[in-house]
Image (cartoon, rainbow, N blue to C red):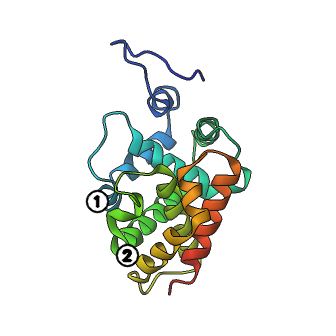
């Protein structure tokens, strides 16, 4: 897939806009449904015009399922994941939707909008790592004290290695691995 394509109106398309045009089927339906999740909308905010929110949903799913095989560039990783998941089964789609919904509910209740904006602006690396860390915690059972997520988040932000991994070279394998690992560790102790 080329880096950019022009729409009929002459505007360069973003990577997710190209994916939406190329990949059809249940994965696209799933992404659209998850992008409408009430908690996701509350944390993310208003819909952008260029599908960045849609892409971050895809990014979470891809990293949640395949973080161990991540390799840069992120764009290629997401293209491969979406291509492989075009015909995701109804059962698997329900499972992913459940993980996503539980994760956004916990993040919204425990941390709120700041989870995605550690420095007041949306940070895609913070989005993927916080969502991943909370989802991995939820794999071990429900969170009974969601407000403890806020304390764990503050400790995570105080970690210089984590801050570097969400601020510099964010698509490098080392940065992705570091931030996902640190986020999973930070949230693992939340009751």
Q: Nearer the viewer, residue 138 or 155?
A: 155
Instruction: Report crowding for label 2: few under 14, some 14 to 19, many 20 or more residues within 10 A (C-alpha).
Output: many
Where residue 142 is drawn, which disc sits there?
Answer: none
Task: Give the quadrant of residue 111.
Answer: bottom left
Q: Which mark is first along the chain, 1 or 2?
A: 1
The secondary structure type at the circle numbered 2 is: helix
Instruction: Report crowding for label 1: few under 14, some 14 to 19, many 20 or more residues within 10 A (C-alpha).
Output: some
**Which residue lies at the image location 43% right of the left edge and 15% below the top edge?**
6
**Location of the N terminus (image quadrant):** top right
Task: Say which residue label 1 marks.
Answer: 42
Is residue 83 visible from the viewing direction of this image? yes
Please tell me whether residue 85 is drawn above or below residue 186 in the rendered image. above
Task: Say which residue label 2 marks.
Answer: 110
The secondary structure type at the circle numbered 1 is: helix
Please tell me whether residue 153 is drawn above or below residue 11 in the rendered image. below
Q: Nearer the viewer, residue 42 or 89?
A: 42
Report x, y in % for residue 74. Answer: 61, 41
Is residue 139 visible from the viewing direction of this image? no
Q: Nearer the viewer, residue 140 or 50?
A: 50
Report x, y in % for residue 139. Answer: 58, 73
Distance from label 2 to label 1 (Cα)? 13 Å
Report x, y in % for residue 19. Answer: 51, 31
**Which residue lies at the image location 62% right of the left edge and 63% below the top edge?**
161
**Which residue lies at the image location 43% right of the left edge and 83% below the top edge?**
148
**Which residue lies at the image location 65% right of the left edge and 37% below the top edge?**
73
46 to the left or right of 56: left
Mark 2 in CB contact with mark 1 (< 8 angstroms): no
């Amino acid at each position: 897939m080329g880096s950019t394509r022009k729409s009929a109106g002459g505007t360069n398309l973003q990577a997710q806009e190209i994916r939406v045009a190329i990949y059809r089927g249940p994965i696209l339906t799933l992404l659209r449904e998850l992008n409408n999740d009430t908690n996701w909308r509350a944390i993310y905010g208003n819909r952008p015009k260029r599908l960045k929110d849609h892409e971050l949903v895809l990014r979470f799913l891809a990293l949640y399922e395949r973080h161990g095989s991540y390799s840069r560039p992120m764009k290629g990783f997401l293209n491969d994941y979406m291509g492989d998941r075009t015909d995701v089964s109804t059962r698997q789609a329900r499972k992913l939707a459940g993980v996503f919904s539980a994760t956004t509910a916990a993040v919204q209740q425990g941390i709120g909008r700041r989870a995605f904006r550690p420095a007041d602006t949306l940070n895609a690396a913070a989005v993927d790592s916080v969502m991943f860390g909370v989802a991995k915690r939820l794999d071990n059972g429900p969170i009974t004290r969601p407000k403890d997520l806020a304390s764990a988040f503050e400790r995570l932000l105080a970690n210089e290695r984590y801050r570097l991994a969400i601020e510099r070279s964010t698509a490098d394998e080392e940065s992705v691995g570091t931030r996902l690992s640190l986020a999973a560790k930070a949230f693992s102790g939340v009751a």
